[in-house]
Image (spheres, grey):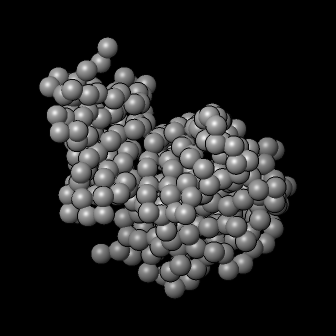
Amino acid sequence: MLDAPGYPGTSANSINNLGQIAGFVEDSFGVQHGFLLSKSGYTYFDVPAPGGTLGTAAWGINNAGEIVGSYISAIDERDHGFIRNAAGDSYLLFDFPGSIITDAYGINDSGQVVGSYVTDAQHGFVRCPDGTYLSLDAPGSDGGFNQNFFGINSDGQISGLYLGLNGNLVGYHGFIATPAIIKVLMEIKSPSTTPVPIDPHSQGEIPVAVLTTTDFDASTVDPTTVRFGPAGAHSVSATLEDVNGNGYLDLVLHFATQATGIKCGDTRASLTGKTASGQLAFGSETILTVGCP
């Protein structure tokens, strides 16, 4: 049994390979507070959101000690997502674009966050490390019903549940999306050093290559679905060429630097897209911003 001392309610929601546990407690007033349980004991926290919070719930933790969850804003009394860094001294607050509710439930070691959001219906999402998003619906469901996307592993496989199928609202159904996302190899400014130098103030373009391997054909990626960088930039051009001399054609896309949203201090840039069959694809590479103050 696991009960946090001094609190009438305890929910232990996730554990990593180091034995660190993330969850939340409920106080005598019914207010939730996040916690991290490690060898040194309990660390309690509330998200430092503008305007204050009415509750904090930690749902997931990865092997780096990063924690994700949701907080209730005192301003609009709705759920919003957060990522707490391993040191516990920084919080990234986020919402799926256009949503009125966002709940973050899981995070893998690549920094991909999985959860659910509400617009006119409830859907799932994956948030990539650079702030780009993928919207998801449970396999076999017709969308629009209660869908919760709880966990994501290092291969991008996602688990969760949904209510009803084809309008049938009786009972919950579990699912595993296998794989939910294809992890593709990509090269920015190929060939280049790592981390790749990028000047956020440049008025030029950034070439990004999605590489073809023995397991993945980059030509199957639909260029019109590809987004790059925190702002989700569309490509201005796309060609097939062998950039690394291995005899396979790679997909080479160019993005206007100013459209990517890459800013000084960013350390990673990601790319998302879909194949012609609708399979989600994700790639990421480390960068070094240059020409910054």
User: Could you tell me which residue is drawn at 66 percent across and 46 percent down?
Assistant: 138
Q: Position of residue 250 (x, y in %)?
A: 77, 61
Judge by depth and name the residue closer to the eye, 273 or 145: 145
Which quarter of the rendered picture does the N terminus lie within? Answer: top left
For this orientation, the residue located farthest to the top is 1
Judge by depth and name the residue closer to the eye, 127 or 140: 140
- Above or below, 30 against 241 in this view is above
Residue 123 in view here: yes
| Left or right, 109 with reference to 191 | left
- Above or below, 9 against 227 in this view is above
| Left or right, 6 with reference to 23 | left
Residue 196 in view here: no
For this orientation, the residue located farthest to the bottom is 203
User: Could you tell me which residue is drawn at 68 percent across and 61 percent down?
Assistant: 273
Q: Position of residue 52 (x, y in %)?
A: 20, 58
Judge by depth and name the residue closer to the eye, 233 or 180: 180
Count of labels in the image: 0
- Above or below, 219 against 223 in this view is above
Judge by depth and name the residue closer to the eye, 29 or 208: 29
User: Could you tell me which residue is drawn at 45 percent across and 42 percent down?
Assistant: 105
Q: Position of residue 126 (x, y in %)?
A: 55, 52
Which quarter of the rendered picture does the C terminus lie within? Answer: bottom left
Q: Position of residue 74 (x, y in %)?
A: 24, 59
For this orientation, the residue located farthest to the left is 6
